[in-house]
Amino acid sequence: MALKLLHSADWQIGRIYSQFEPDDAAALFEARFSVIERLATLAIERSVDAVLVAGDVFDAQTVSDKTIRRLFNAMMGYPGAWVMLPGNHDAALAESVWTRAHRLGVVPPNVVTCLEPSVRIVGEGFAVLPAPLTQRHTYGDLTEWFSSASTPEGLHRIGLAHGCVQGVLPDDIDSANPIAVNRAATAGLDYLALGDWHGSKRIDERTWYAGTPETDRFRANDSGLALLVDIAAPGAAPEVQTLQTGRYRWQQIEHRLAVSSDVDETLKALAETGSDDVLQIRVSGVCDLHGQRRLQHGVEAARARLRALVYESHGLRLEPTEEDIATLHADGYVGEALQQLRTEQEGPQADRARDALVVLARMLDELGSRPAATSPEVRA
């Protein structure tokens, strides 16, 4: 019997984006509910037998009751089976976000919450072997029991786990929870659905990370996707297709400035971004005050156009030219202060000196742009 699944993971519902401005953070918070609605729509359109969610459904145990209710409301568009696993962010503790959801009575009958490591039969087509995390970090392979678990003959064997496939993923992912690289083979699985790595990644023909369906960090790792898994019959190799689900594109721009044309290139890169971009831009090197003003104006224009923007210029050294100083009319004591701040950028207070230099230049700009005061008319 054929089986068709939609594999997702790492929804991180309730995540707070504190690095962004409040309105941008709120929009990104909402996007995580919207993408669940898109998953439900895809599940209907692709006629899947079930949706697998491989851990970290919630970002934290402390999400509000309202957030829990909103999640299950977002899932209502697909009436088929949703099979959900606790991950390291929402581990199946004795008292957890999962026990709270059940106590609230908001988990619908078509949602299977795999809170214990035991075989679950879903519908008439497949058996799920889940490896729920019962604490944030474990140091043993919780999928080991898959290899000795028996399932009814003729049913697909589907593994569901959240953690780090050993020897494959980088060391800096969220969780150290180990998973044997050959687990699908040793356990006779038709498919092993994984979560924790936030990008889509093939481990072998039967083992995949789905990644988060809505990108949530500045890392080029094929996120914002879900996996459509077709298995023709028990024992057959799955056919896996990636489906686009995310709305926002998280991008990084890193430019080192040396000459004025480098500022032009940075502004060009900024202009090529759009309203659904979440951008981190980092500039370093050397720039004169005129170039810095152009950069600042470009960044502020982009900030109003993009979904969210983080601008980092800690590595940028400001070098006022003689033309800058003449334009600012910075003579006498003010000129000396300007030069002093320029020199102090090489010392231990470099960040403060650069910031003060920008503020001073801005103040002088504003003073220079004000119309000269006129004396009141004297009447004879």
Image (cartoon, helix red, strand yellow):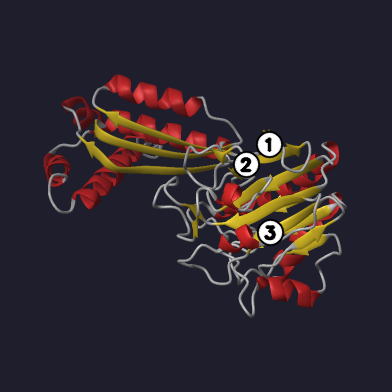
Cα separation between marks 3 and 1: 18 Å
**Which numbered circle lies on residue 129?**
3
Q: Position of residue 219 (x, y in %)?
A: 47, 41
Residue at which label 2 appears: 206
Q: Position of residue 151 (x, y in %)?
A: 75, 58
Q: Is residue 237 left or right of residue 252?
A: right
- Residue 309 seen in the current view: yes
Question: Looking at the image, which residue is at 81% across and 69% down?
Answer: 106
Tag 1 and tag 2, C-beta contact below 8 Å: yes
Nearer-the-camera pick, 279 or 344: 279
Task: Give, as a three-letter code, the residue at label 2.
Answer: Arg
> Circle 2 sits in a helix, a strand or a loop, which is it?
loop
> Circle 3 sits in a helix, a strand or a loop, which is it?
strand
Question: Looking at the image, which residue is at 28% across and 22% down?
Answer: 260
Nearer-the-camera pick, 299 or 118: 118
Q: Is residue 189 left or right of residue 373?
A: right
Nearer-the-camera pick, 36 or 286: 36
Q: Quadrant of the N terminus?
A: top right
Q: Position of residue 42 (x, y in %)?
A: 79, 40
Given the current orientation, which residue lies at the most extreme bottom position?
A: 94
Q: Position of residue 157 (x, y in %)?
A: 72, 51
Nearer-the-camera pick, 23 or 320: 23
Question: Looking at the image, which residue is at 82% across and 37% down?
Answer: 46
Task: Give, as a three-letter code, the residue at label 1.
Answer: Ala
Residue at which label 1 appears: 237
Q: Quadrant of the C terminus?
A: top left
Sequence order check: which comes first, mark 3 or mark 2? 3
Residue 161 placement: quadrant: bottom right
> Circle 1 sits in a helix, a strand or a loop, which is it?
loop
